[in-house]
Image (tube, grey):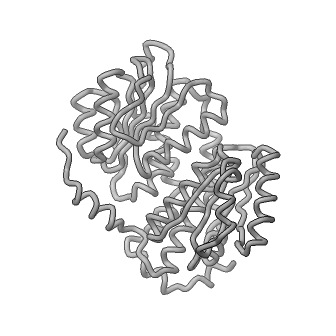
Amino acid sequence: MDYLKFPEDYLSFDTEDILSQYRSLAQDIKKAFDMGEQWSFQPLKAPIDQLVFIGVGGSAISFDFLKAYLIHLGINKPIFVVRDYNVPNTVTANSLVFVASYSGETEETLSAYKTAFRITQNIFTVSSGGKLEEICNLNKTPFLQVPKGYQPRTAALSYLFFPFLKALEKLRVLPPQDNSVIQIMNTVLKPNFKDLAIAISEKLVDKIPLIYSSNLMYPVAYRLKTAINENAKVHAFSHAYSELNHNELMGFTNLKASYHIITFRFNHDHRRIQKRMDSMKDITNTKGVATTEIALSGEDFLTKLISAVYVGDLIAIYLALRYKTDPSPVLLVEEFKKKIGPVIF
């Protein structure tokens, strides 16, 4: 689809120019990865027994991406993504803890950090400042300040992800990641991704998006669900194969709304998962529910993952603009925070 076919006047609804943060994504990825060198990496006193990633929202989803990558690489350690006020009771002095809060003010993350610090000193933290920076400086745990002025959901693809990738490299949990980072940078520059996102966003107008993927790549599906929530300010739902074939499939018996399915497919998906995707599409098509497939192939797992998320984010933004909605503000979230009141630490 020609980009010029997207109504140009709709772009005026992007008052904070969130699209510019995606135009600069390749440069931001490089900066974020290089920033990871700024941490002081001291040899760990003992082998890592588990990895614990603490964050919510955009910070947590960046850790979901990291967890998926580590699982793909066969890292033989328990991995937890914590979206809560507490950490797992399995955390020990030998656990490696990563903490992210773009604002540095996220109350769940501040609480979980304090709990983790009472147990282990192996804590690496990223934020743009706030209370989290103050606490890290007080406790003398490694802290990295990232640039202000981003939406947390966009920073999740750069400053809330790549510094931690560098940390895992420097801590010898992962081999050197430079080649993957270069591949990702080159891939997100492809102009056809923007055209693809514009075309898919048109299909979602006045539909409830149902977003599916394999279990390993579920962070991609969940990310698109939350991106549509935050940017377009409408509901969307996600699920993973093969679990959805044992429950959600039955929801197509008595349709009560108008849906459109987006299925992320990857060439490394299990052959039976790919068969399930084909069969699911046949069934839902007979029910009058169309499916759009986003199929990515290639050898580099991380490039496929980040590319899929990048396309999904653009879909959500262009859908917001089609609804004549500013994608940046999250007024209901801010209203909710005021309603529950501040927390005292």
Task: In the displayed orientation, state which residue is furthest to the left.
Answer: 344
Quarter occupied by residue 119 = top left
Q: Position of residue 66 (x, y in %)?
A: 55, 40
The quadrant of the rendering that contains the C terminus is top left
Residue drawn at (53%, 74%), measured in percent from left and top? 319
The quadrant of the rendering that contains the N terminus is bottom right
In front here: 251 or 147?
251
Residue drawn at (22%, 38%), measured in percent from left and top? 134
Is residue 169 rendered to the left or right of residue 328? right
Q: Position of residue 121 (x, y in %)?
A: 35, 22
Q: Is residue 79 above or below residue 318?
A: above
Is residue 60 rendered to the left or right of residue 111? right
Q: Position of residue 211 (x, y in %)?
A: 62, 60
Is residue 191 rendered to the left or right of residue 28? right
Q: Is residue 287 above or below residue 60?
A: below
Instruction: Look at the image and tell me whether residue 187 can be seen.
Output: no
Residue drawn at (64%, 57%), measured in percent from left and top? 248
Q: Position of residue 201 (x, y in %)?
A: 60, 73
In front here: 26 or 323?
323
